[in-house]
Image: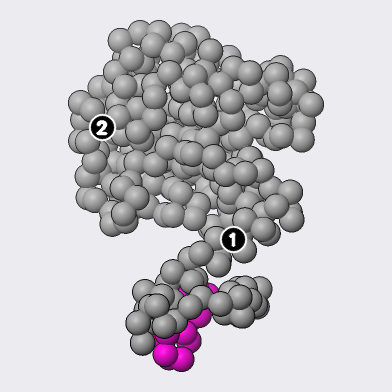
Amino acid sequence: MSPVQQPITAELRQWIVEQAQAGVQPEAVLESMKASGWQEEVAIAALEDTLRGFLDDRARANLLPPPVPVPDPLPPEGGMPATLMAGDREVRVLLAMRNPRVIVFGGLLSDAECDEMIDLAGRRLARSETVQTDTGASEVNAARTSDGMFFERGENALCQRIEARIGALVGWPVENGEGLQVLRYRPGAEYKPHYDYFDPAQPGTPTILKRGGQRVGTLVMYLNSPKVGGGTTFPDVQLEVAPVKGHAVFFSYDRAHPSSRTLHGGAPVLEGEKWVATKWLREGVFR
């Protein structure tokens, strides 16, 4: 039968929704439709359109914030390239997940850049703080046992070069990024699982968002390789990224909500030290 002879009816849409509510995977629903005589392109169109509406309705019912555009280094048409150009440097794609969007890059920074960043930051380290979304201020948090400092965006030639490289890699304006934060974790230090977006339910969040909107992406760059421990963990998807000097892990979150599945943390350093540089990306220009 041709697509014209196979109208996507309300009954078909309802059946698709019922399958989704029962937990049947879209691939299995598609195979059932094809086995019943539906042409593949019609079945796919019906599935995509119906499930998109179903998910949007469910999001509204759960009072989820609407999705927003996010940086994404990989092409939308799919397929994972082995390497990507990041302005002045070619980097390797070592791992890519779509839900959540997590990408591990190899060789984003050179050894010399890592060493220079540690040297520059080491002179200004202090006990790390976190942003308090109930007030908008920063304070020491027992969940984050590290030393750290912030560079202003474009503060020096090294920061400018790395920020331009990140912008080219993820396709996001440099001015939409916060300044680089450098952290040092000594043996036993960790950062317990948390989200990087600012909680919309907290009273201090509107003040924070005036500086550039929500955070929508994070890039963690490893400046050294600790002997044991210190991986970046994603508990919701049982993933741990090893901290390898020069490598980086990127993840994005299109909603300021746990449904983004971007809960992550820094596992305890068991031997040696861990140095990282973190870049947070905002919706708009960060001032």
In this rendering, would 37 be left or right of 205? left
Residue 33, percent across and down?
Answer: 47, 84
Residue 232: % across, % down = 49, 43
Is 207 rendered above or below residue 222?
A: above
Query: Horizontal and vertical percent for residue 276?
Result: 44, 29
Type of amino acid at the residue the image marks with label 2: Ala
Q: Quadrant of residue 31?
A: bottom left
Q: Is residue 17 visible?
A: yes
Residue tagged 2:
86
- The figure's colour scheme reads one colour
Specify whether residue 1 is painted magenta. no
Q: Magenta stretch containing residue 37, yes or no? A: yes
Q: Which residues are magenta?
A: 25-38
Element at badge 2?
Answer: strand
Q: Residue at x 39, y 41 (%)?
A: 72
Q: Is residue 259 left or right of residue 273?
A: right
Quarter of the image holding residue 65?
A: top right
Whether residue 139 can be seen here: no
| Residue under numbered circle 1 | 53
